[in-house]
Image (cartoon, grey):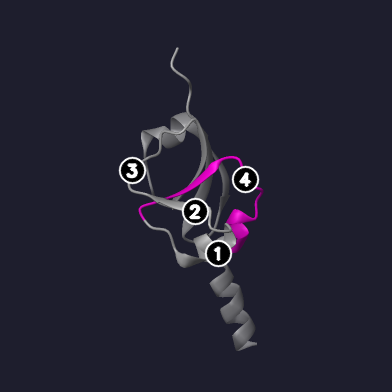
Amino acid sequence: MCAYAALVAADQFSDRDLLASGIDSADALYYLDERPYSAQYYSGGRAIQAKAFPHDRRFYLVTRRNFKHPGLDQHCELRSQNAERTLYFCRMDPPA
């Protein structure tokens, strides 16, 4: 029973379920600040580490759960989250 509890607890932090929520392969996948090895594995090598908020027209963004940025409220919608990270889908409005 102890091993099962450890697996369930570890799964809360895994990016497997976070990324399994239906990411479109046509859009970039950014990890802000840090990109764990599991992100590379479960994204099939698509996860890109970003040091700043991306400005692509459409993209997926994974951040720490407590990350705050005005761009999140303006351009992004929550798609999934686990105990440590949150996945957003973002669309930057084209210039008018």
The residue shown at (33%, 48%) is: 51
Which quadrant would residue 36 be assigned to in this image? bottom left
**Residue extending furthest toward the top:** 96
Report if the CB atoms under discs 2 and 1 are less than 8 Å apart: no
Q: Which residue is mark 3?
A: 52
Q: Quadrant of residue 89?
A: top right
* Image point (47%, 66%), residue name: 37
- Judged from the image, the secondary structure of the residue bearing numbered disc 2 is strand
Q: Is residue 21 magenta?
A: yes
User: Dot 1 lies on which element?
Assistant: helix
Magenta segment? 16-33
Dot 1 amino acid type = Tyr
Can you say whether 95 is above or below 3 in the image?
Answer: above
Q: Quadrant of the C terminus?
A: top left
Q: Which residue is mark 4?
A: 25
Are discs 3 and 4 less than 8 Å apart at CB? no
Instruction: List the residue tagged with mark 2.
Output: 47
